[in-house]
Amino acid sequence: MAGNTFGTLFKLTTFGESHGEAIGGILEGCPPNLQLNLEAIQQEMDRRKPGQSAIVTQRKEADQVRFLSGVFEGKTTGTPIGFVIFNSNQKSGDYDHIKDSYRPSHADYVYDKKYGIRDYRGGGRSSARETACRVVAGAIAKQFLSNLKFNAFVSQVGSITLNKPYQELDLSLTETNPVRCPDPATAAEMEAHIREVRKEGDTIGGVITGVIQNVPIGLGEPVFDKLHAQLGKAMLSINAVKGFEYGSGFDGVRMKGSEHNDAYKSDGTTKTNFSGGVQGGISNGMDIYFNVAFKPVATLIQPYETIDKKGETVQTKGKGRHDPCVVPRAVPIVEAMAALVLADFELLNRTIKS
């Protein structure tokens, strides 16, 4: 299987399956002598881990990170950073009923057709559990990019939308509720809706907004490695993501060029930021902001019709522990992937200037 590595210089390779012994990763390119705050890394993991509230999967995983290499006396050595996260609360029997059939909108069918074998226990390698490795690497990237601020939050669940620009929000409130929406009133509506959908044995999608602040001018490469193109790739690599937009995004098509152009101030900043902090594929020093759309979780805890390996129609029902809405736990994943992209471009800028 190819496609297990992300990045060029600040490069993460992950391994492991949802119900295997462990998941983990190797992070290459992190500069030496970076003092790591291991507690901060674990805090990021705690934001993503299952079982943290009543509106997410109740699988109980401590998600304790164990570093195997690349760190000595609390500092990075410049060598590959190896880490592992052991799985401790698998219930593989929950998936025995689908070993010979394919769940709709999962990777089951295409994995079986592509490889001739599939790990049906929780989806194996296609499980979102793999994203825990990304959060570890992203937490290290955040510490490498300590001058930058990465904030993501839930801005929509189903049809419930937070209709305020991020500049008007107190982003410190994001972690004060289980939905991770920085507007308390909207968060309460979202939580109630998720609970209602969960009682029905159904699921719901949503949108996460990401904001990166204090970004220097010059990150990103023109043509194929544009900054926003790499951010799009990063976000679209996350499980259940169906859409990405940055800056004015799709709303920009309603505007005329005279309205959409970001006029300059004398100091080089712009009066507006419809560009979303990126021009010509290169950061311009303004805030980078974007939206990531997540589909409803495909596993339904209700009867459904599908096909088995013989192509025959069968009736089955989802079992096990699943998120009724993935977006609350995906917030730290979005931040992590954004940090990995910017760390990669920061290192690339250093090689260009040296």
Image (cartoon, helix red, strand yellow):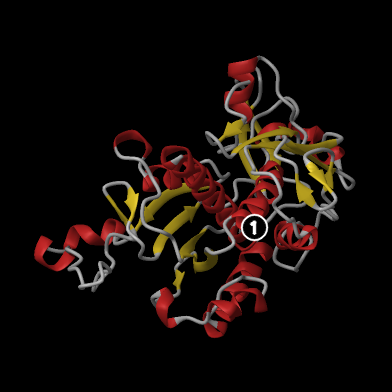
Q: Which residue is mark 1?
A: 143
At horizontal 71% and vertical 23% (from top left) the residue drawn is 118
Q: Residues within 10 Å of mark 1 (few under 14, many from 20)?
A: some
| Image spot of residue 192 (x, y percent) | 61, 75
Under circle 1, the secondary element is helix
Between 258 and 255, the one lying in front of the other is 258
* Residue 329 seen in the current view: yes
The residue furthest front is: 354
At horizontal 40% and vertical 61% (from top left) the residue drawn is 288
At horizontal 74% and vertical 56% (from top left) the residue drawn is 36
| Image spot of residue 100 (x, y percent) | 73, 25
At label 1, the amino acid type is Gln
The residue furthest right is: 88
Between 352 and 65, the one lying in front of the other is 352
The quarter of the rendered structure image containing the N terminus is: top right
Q: How many marks?
A: 1
Looking at the image, residue 195 lies above or below residue 184: above
Tell me if 122 is positioned left or right of 159 in this view. right
The residue furthest bottom is: 185
At horizontal 63% and vertical 43% (from top left) the residue drawn is 304
Tell me if 48 is positioned left or right of 331 in this view. right
Tell me if 249 is positioned left or right of 135 in this view. left
| Image spot of residue 348 (x, y percent) | 47, 40
| Image spot of residue 37 (x, y percent) | 76, 60
* Residue 202 seen in the current view: no
Between 303 and 138, the one lying in front of the other is 138
Tell me if 78 is positioned left or right of 241 in this view. right
The residue furthest top is: 116
